[in-house]
């Protein structure tokens, strides 16, 4: 075997090795960390104490769900496309869509009046979706 062939083999193995390390590191960095999501969920729940911050709670819940979908590498550019891609993993798809549509409505019309039932339905749906995706384990 010539020196050129040995160098070529060494370079090939180095590229394979670096690719595997990069792929593993990327997967490690993009994994869902339930403690992070639990902390964010508890912060979000504090917003529910005051009626004035209910809209913020819903939009934060929607953002948290979007982050979990991204970590799970759901295909799609928009949140709607990611939710559609995840629909088979979500146990209550309708309530998740309800929450997402409510969050969009609140962004478009910040003064939209909310009922307590709307907030509960939206947050229960997002919480279950986060559980389904493995982002939340035992958050209330």
Image (cartoon, rainbow, N blue to C red):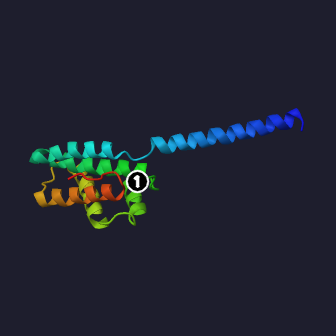
Q: Residue at x 72, y 40 (%)?
A: 13
Judge whether 7 appears above or below 96 on screen.
above
16 left or right of 75 in image: right
121 left or right of 89 in image: left
Task: Choose top left, top right, bottom left or bottom right for residue 74.
Answer: bottom left
| Residue positioned most to the right | 2
Q: Residues within 10 Å of mark 1 (few under 14, many from 20)?
A: few
What residue is pinned by disc 1? 78
Secondary structure, mark 1, is loop
Task: Choose top left, top right, bottom left or bottom right for residue 123.
Answer: bottom left
116 left or right of 88 in image: left
Residue 101 makes an appearance in the image: no
Q: Residue at x 36, y 54 (%)?
A: 134
Residue 85 makes an appearance in the image: yes
State which quarter of the image contains the N terminus: top right
On the image, the x and y values in percent for residue 67 come to 36, 47
On the image, the x and y values in percent for residue 113 come to 12, 54
On the image, the x and y values in percent for residue 57 come to 20, 47
Judge whether 4 appears above or below 52 on screen.
above
On the image, the x and y values in percent for residue 93 come to 31, 65
Judge whether 2 appears above or below 84 on screen.
above
Disc tally is: 1
Q: Nearer the viewer, residue 129 or 63?
A: 129
Q: Nearer the viewer, residue 59 or 43?
A: 43
């Amino acid at each position: 075997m010539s020196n050129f062939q040995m160098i070529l083999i060494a370079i090939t193995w180095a590229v394979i090795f670096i690719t595997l390390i990069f792929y593993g590191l990327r997967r490690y960095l993009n994994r869902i960390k339930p403690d992070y999501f639990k902390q964010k969920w508890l912060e979000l729940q504090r917003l529910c104490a005051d009626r004035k911050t209910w809209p913020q709670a819903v939009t934060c819940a929607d953002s948290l769900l979007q982050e979990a979908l991204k970590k799970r590498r759901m295909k799609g550019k928009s949140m709607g496309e990611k939710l559609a891609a995840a629909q088979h993993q979500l146990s209550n798809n309708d309530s998740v869509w309800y929450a997402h549509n409510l969050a969009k409505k609140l962004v478009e019309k910040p003064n939209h009046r909310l009922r307590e039932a709307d907030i509960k339905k939206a947050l229960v749906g997002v919480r279950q979706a986060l559980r389904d995706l493995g982002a939340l384990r035992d958050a209330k």
